[in-house]
Amino acid sequence: EREWLMKVAVDPDLCQGHARCWEICPEVFSLDDVGHGTVTVDVVPVGLEAEVAKAVSNCPERAITVS
Ligand code: F3S
């Protein structure tokens, strides 16, 4: 089984507060006080990579990037 580190970020200039990231993976995403997506971890915990990938593809603004 391969292990790797997946980093994730939300671009605050692109985010429009659709909140799908948080609905899909609340372990990694949160919403700030104006409803914009934020990440609560620097590195995605092992086992949550697929959920984060789903959040990436479900963000209407394409505001989430992984590296
Ligand atoms: Fe923002 Fe996309 Fe999440 S618009 S709140 S990063 S689903």
Image (cartoon, rainbow, N blue to C red):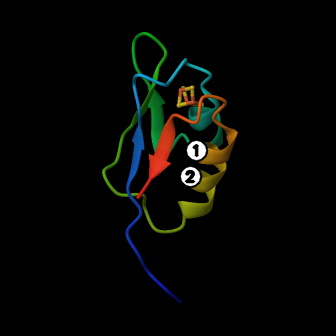
Q: Position of residue 9 (x, y in %)?
A: 39, 43
Q: Is residue 48 visible?
A: no
- Which numbered mark, 2 or 1, is in the foreground of this view? 2
Q: What amino acid is at disc 1?
A: Cys
Q: Of helix, strand and loop, which one carries label 2?
A: helix
Q: Left or right: where does residue 40 sit relative to residue 21?
A: left
Q: Position of residue 52 (x, y in %)?
A: 56, 52
Residue closest to the eye, 48 or 61:
61
Q: Is residue 64 visible?
A: yes
Q: What amino acid is at disc 2?
A: Val
Q: Quadrant of the C terminus?
A: bottom left
* Above/below status of 50 relative to 11: below
How packed is label 2: few (under 14 Cα within 10 Å), some, or many (20 or more)? Answer: many
Give the Cα distance between marks 2 and 1: 7 Å
Q: Left or right: where does residue 30 sit relative to residue 17?
A: left
Residue behind label 1 places its C-beta within 8 angstroms of ligand 1: no
Would you name the residue on which mark 1 appears?
Answer: 25
Image marks 2 and 1: residues in contact by CB distance under 8 Å: yes
Q: Residue at x 35, y 57 (%)?
A: 43
Q: Residue at x 37, y 69 (%)?
A: 5
Q: Of helix, strand and loop, which one carries label 1?
A: loop
Q: Residue at x 54, y 62 (%)?
A: 49
Residue sitting farthest toward the bottom: 1
Nearer the N terminus, badge 2 or badge 1?
1
Would you name the residue on which mark 2 appears?
Answer: 52
Toward which corner of the image does residue 59 lie, by quadrant? Answer: top right
* Above/below status of 34 relative to 56: above
Number of dots carrying numbers: 2
Q: Position of residue 26 (x, y in %)?
A: 54, 40
The disc at residue 14 is none
